[in-house]
Image (spheres, grey):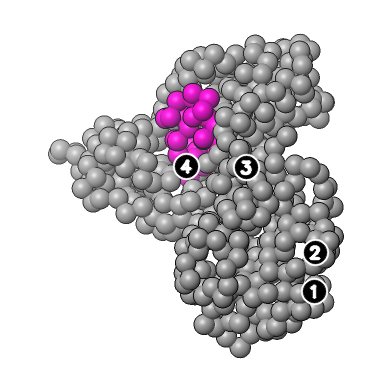
Amino acid sequence: MTEKILILDFGSQYTQLIARAVREANVYCEIIPFHKEIKFSPELKGVILSGSPFSVNEANAPHVDVKQIAGNHPVLGLCYGAQLISTYFGGRVEKSEKREFGRAILQKNTEDILLDEVPETSQVWMSHGDSILSLPENASLLATTNSIPVAAFKVTEPACNDIFGLQFHPEVYHSEYGKKIIQNFLYKVCGCTGDWTPAHFITDTINSLKEQIGDKKVVMGLSGGVDSTVAATLIHRAIGKNLFGIFVDNGVLRKNEFESVLKTYEQLDLNVKGVDASQVFYNALAGLTNPEEKRKAIGKTFIEVFDAEAQELTDISFLGQGTIYPDVIESVSVHGPSVTIKSHHNVGGLPETMKLSLIEPLRSLFKDEVRKVGLELGIPHELLFRHPFPGPGLAIRILGDITEDKVKLLQAADDIYIESLKRHGLYDKVWQAGAILLPVKSVGVMGDERTYEFTVALRAVTSVDGMTADWAHLPYEFLGEVSNEIINQVRGINRVVYDISSKPPATIEWE
């Protein structure tokens, strides 16, 4: 039975960071909206209340029964969570005259298990407009800053476990001893053992899959990406050849990707059928220039191809998918599902007529945890740590209409670019890189001849999660070398430019 921490989400932008900090301490945790009923169970060890854009004094401010929760498990409130705890027990929270945003110096007032091994003064990160001006009678002050009277406190309530509140954000990088404080809460307050490791996850997941699937069969659409490969490997470890993988060549993969991915699957002993449907996709994309229309065409065609292949199999009961935890969090967010910015993920939905039950072995993991599990499973490093690649592939890196000739042009240019990044030791220093074929032709000179050929834009960004990104400051010498190589080797391209826009306002992809 895996021990667990529950994070109640009040809409904070930092909620996922809290979860990551807990996971990094080898303790499993889940995020649920604050209004969802808590299932108190032996494996649940503690509850963390997140921050929020709300003020506790607003009429529609979210609330929970702190005493009921603390009657079962220790509680740690962060920012809004701390203010909620304070007002619940009779403290006073008001708009502060001195708002704190950014770095502040934490000053310990007294020793407590939560702040164990934290220096008398340390840097923390603040982000709040309200302040706790007075604590409840049953609370003791643990720490302050120069600007606010209450930065950390503890509530002692009869028939309740320990209740702590922190006005600052220990989960963010800028709080020097924030991770230590979270670990103190997990280990010293909640009594966690920190036994949630990749190896532990693999063992538990395989056993669970064996029990769930039994001797039935699973079909899975593979994309060649990290998530689907790791998910398929776990399912394979559980049921062997009863997993039937389908890898579709949609005609807009990277150069030689279809062959290389199939070879990797063979090395992993996965039962995967490769389907070359490139011409089917080219026909579906013919004449389309709108990015959303191209995405929908690829998604629809994938479903049709996958469905046709799946129908050839018999007695299939389950559909395997590489869904990961951020996808799950987004769908159950305190704010509800996010607005769709672009359609089509790596693997589209399937016809309802298939009536298959879902198998999602990675739905509890973040992307970095998926990679750790993949390493433990022996999946090649190159596949696990390759850059993100869009589900619609090069179709959204070709602006305008899609033709087979344009795809081949971009594949060649992109391959030169990516291989050069690897050769110069730059590939792992950027989060994502790729080439974009522009619907622009310009005049060039090669030898004694004028050319009128396409322009390619090179894109490379640094990022943590793709939500924001900065353009990668690649060396000029490197860019010059790549430009020269592309122009000399790829007939049809005579000009190379480099994209230096950040996200926001731009996006990482061009479409």
Quarter assignment of residue 204: top right
Q: Of the numbered discs in the image, which one, if any, rests on residue 452? A: none
Q: Residue at x 57, y 68 (%)?
A: 111
Closer-to-camera residue (507/468)? 468
Mark 3 or mark 1: name the one nearer the start of the chain: 1
The answer for how far apart the CA atoms under marks 3 and 2 are is 25 Å
Q: Position of residue 390 (x, y in %)?
A: 53, 39
The residue indicated by pointer 4 is: 397
Of badges 1 and 4, nearer the viewer stands 1
Circles 1 and 4 in contact, beta carbons < 8 Å = no
The answer for how far apart the CA atoms under marks 1 and 2 are is 9 Å
Q: What stretch is highlighted in magenta?
A: 370-399
Quarter assignment of residue 135: bottom right
Q: Is residue 493 visible?
A: no
The residue indicated by pointer 3 is: 193
Q: Does the magenta stretch include residue 387?
A: yes
Of badges 4 and 3, nearer the viewer stands 3
Q: Can residue 317 be seen in this view?
A: yes
Q: Residue at x 82, y 77 (%)?
A: 59
Circles 1 and 2 in contact, beta carbons < 8 Å = yes
Q: Of the numbered discs in the image, which one, if any, rests on residue 89? A: 1
Taking the image as shown, residue 59 lies to the left or right of residue 180, namely right
What residue type is disc 1 on?
Phe
Mark 4 or mark 2: name the one nearer the start of the chain: 2
The residue indicated by pointer 2 is: 66
Q: Position of residue 288 (x, y in %)?
A: 57, 40
